[in-house]
Amino acid sequence: MRVLVIGSGAREHALVLALSKDPEVVALACAPGNAGTAALAETHGVDAVDPAAVVELAVRWKADLVVIGPEGPLVAGAADAVRAAGVACFGPGSEAARIEGSKAFAKDVMTAAGVPTAHSEVVDNPARLDAALARFGPTWVVKDDGLAAGKGVVVTKDLRAARAHAMTLLDGGHPVLLESFLDGPEVSLFCVVDPAGAVVPLLPAQDFKRVGDGDAGPNTGGMGAYTPLPWAPDGLADDVVERIVRPVVNEMARRGTPFSGLLYAGLAMTSKGPEVIEFNCRFGDPETQAVLAMLRSPLSTLLHAAATGTLAAHPPLEWEPGSAVTVVIAADGYPGRPRTGDVITGAEGEGVLHAGTRRRDDGALVSAGGRVLAVVGTGPDLRTARADAYHRVDAVHLPGSHHRTDIALRAADGEITLPG
């Protein structure tokens, strides 16, 4: 199988790494890729959010399967265009990708499907903002209704901060979604879905959105993750599939926009059980790096089965025993304006996945984004996997960089409990 991966982040590096070990894959390319994927796959330049450019590359390269990583190309219709050209594609069409592209659309789908989620209200006019904010709190959740790369959300007990973020969004022409706050530990569950409605869940994971230790500071695209969850109830994945994912998949099919690809359910484990915080239409970053490190089954056959509507016949997934932990190394200034162009050393080691990197003309590896590297450690338990991850982090040097030191720490210490 010839597989083309679209994207340039650590999520795509993780996908390429898994596919590079797959005996079914005879040729592998990544476009536009990064300095890390270049060591494992052919690199091709492409404007990932230009569907015509993605199709031209897929056809010219003779891809048997195109795997689209980021949400931008999916919302832009790249998967639709690839399928229309007769090439199998893993990823939802643009209408189905609205489950992430519009939070208001996602709420409407969830309401129709009877899925438990936070109470919400969309505000598109500053004149209505203060009255709407008064109906929420004392913890306010303020979201950009559109795509924001994980950074369009403010969760705060400070009404002034909530209002300021909402006004910034509205002044930029973005509708605001206000939500009631869901207490309890968060879970990320990835589900592979095919056009026939078959659903296969992957290992549940937990990510860390705030920039600093102890969940301090602003939200980011994700500073780390781990899997599996030792504190999660038995059968959590199957329960979420039946109560949440399958009803949403069925509702989208009923609307004539069937979902095919990776449906990511971001959940809060409340006293009433799992409730949906958000849906994403693609593999999450940085959870993918940890989850795929534990996957023993060939990735290409799983994704191809989803793309071709044969997922129900796919063998049950096999997983490695133990745990995986991902720690993100971010550039100075992130999640604000990151400093770029700094030389990175030690990034060729095992478990180091590239996100914002590039090669200079002289061959040096330099930073080229906010989240620069994702470092994955594994072990027989979370404590060992944490130690492995941070040992690998210590071998990397990027001037001015920062990372969290507490990824998976509370879980490893048995400090996470479910409400109720």
Image (cartoon, helix red, strand yellow):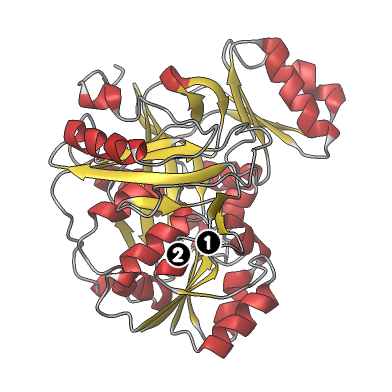
Mark 1, secondary structure of its residue: loop
Vertical comparison of 151 with 126: above or below: below
Query: In the image shown, does 250 or 65 lie closer to the viewer?
Result: 65
Q: Position of residue 33 (x, y in %)?
A: 53, 65
Q: Amino acid at mark 2?
A: Thr
In which quarter of the view is residue 54 placed?
bottom right
The answer to the question of whether label 2 and label 1 lie on touching residues, with beta carbons closer than 8 A, is yes
Image mark count:
2
Can the viewer see residue 286 in this picture?
A: no
The C terminus: image quadrant:
top left
Vertical comparison of 381 with 159: above or below: below
Q: Label 2 crowding class (10 Å Cα cut-off): few <14, some 14-19, many 20+?
A: many
Mark 2, secondary structure of its residue: helix
Q: Position of residue 365 (x, y in %)?
A: 52, 54
Query: In the image shown, does 201 or 42 lie closer to the viewer?
Result: 42
Labelled disc at residue 37: 2
Residue drawn at the location 57% of the way across and 75% of the way down: 44
Residue drawn at the location 50% of the way across and 27% of the way down: 210
Q: Position of residue 341 (x, y in %)?
A: 63, 47
Please give the residue where the numbered disc 1 appears in the rendered image: 34
Q: Is residue 245 left or right of residue 156?
A: left
Q: Is residue 308 left or right of residue 96?
A: left
In which quarter of the view is residue 111 placed?
top right
Residue drawn at the location 42% of the way across and 18% of the way down: 214
Residue drawn at the location 33% of the way across and 52% of the way down: 349
Q: Amino acid at mark 1?
A: Asn
The N terminus: image quadrant:
bottom left
Q: Position of residue 268 (x, y in %)?
A: 40, 30
Q: Label 1 crowding class (10 Å Cα cut-off): few <14, some 14-19, many 20+?
A: many
Separation of disc 2 and disc 1 at Cα?
5 Å
